[in-house]
Image (tube, helix red, strand yellow):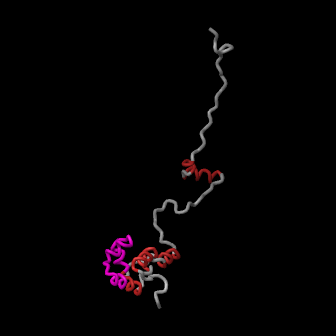
Amino acid sequence: MPSRYPGAITQDWEPVVLHKSKTKAQELRDPKAVNQALRSGAPVQTIKKFDAGSNKKTAPVVNARKLDESTDPGTLDRVPGEVRQAIQKARLEKKMSQAELAKLINERPQVVQEYENGKAVPNQAVLTKMEKALGVKLRGKTGK
């Protein structure tokens, strides 16, 4: 049976040198290591991290607060009075209830009620459906 090694097996007595592992980042942050580096004159870099180690909530920027106040959702336009009256008048002339009109335009009865009470934010699609169902102009100039 042939041997795997072509020559005689010998031991390798060459010395092996083990090097120290590099210092870890955590060890570099150790106050003792920093003080020793300062004493020996080695360069030490310090970096201030933004909001590091603080859980404080800061007040928002003044401009951002003004922006939030200026775009308040309570300032949305509501249905004008003349449109509300035109919807009611046309619906009563056709002898429809609010529920019947809502069914005709494929909306909930609550939507028609909000439009007639002036609480709804005008939606052009809903107004168009109401115009077709009632045969009245509700958008744009209303006869004035």
Residue depicted at x 59% and y 59%:
47
Q: Is residue 64 above or below residue 2?
A: below
* 100 displayed left or right of 64: left
Which quadrant of the figure has residue 121?
Answer: bottom left
**Magenta stretch contains residue 91:** yes
> In the image, is 31 to the left or to the right of 120?
right
Q: How many marks?
A: 0
Q: Quadrant of residue 137?
A: bottom left
Residue 6 image position (x, y, % from top left): 68, 14
Identity of the residue furthest to the top in this view = 1
Left/right placement of residue 78 relative to residue 98 reads right
Magenta stretch encompasses residue 97: yes
Task: Give percent across and percent down for residue 102.
Answer: 35, 73
Which stretch appears magenta?
88-115
**Which quarter of the rendered picture does the N terminus lie within?**
top right
- Residue 73 occupies which quadrant of the picture? bottom left
Q: Main secondary structure of the magenta part?
A: helix
Looking at the image, which residue is at 67% across and 13% down? 8
Q: Nearer the viewer, residue 89 or 68?
A: 89
Viewer-proximal residue, 32 or 49? 49
- Front-most of 118 and 138? 138
Residue 29 position in % (x across, y down): 56, 51
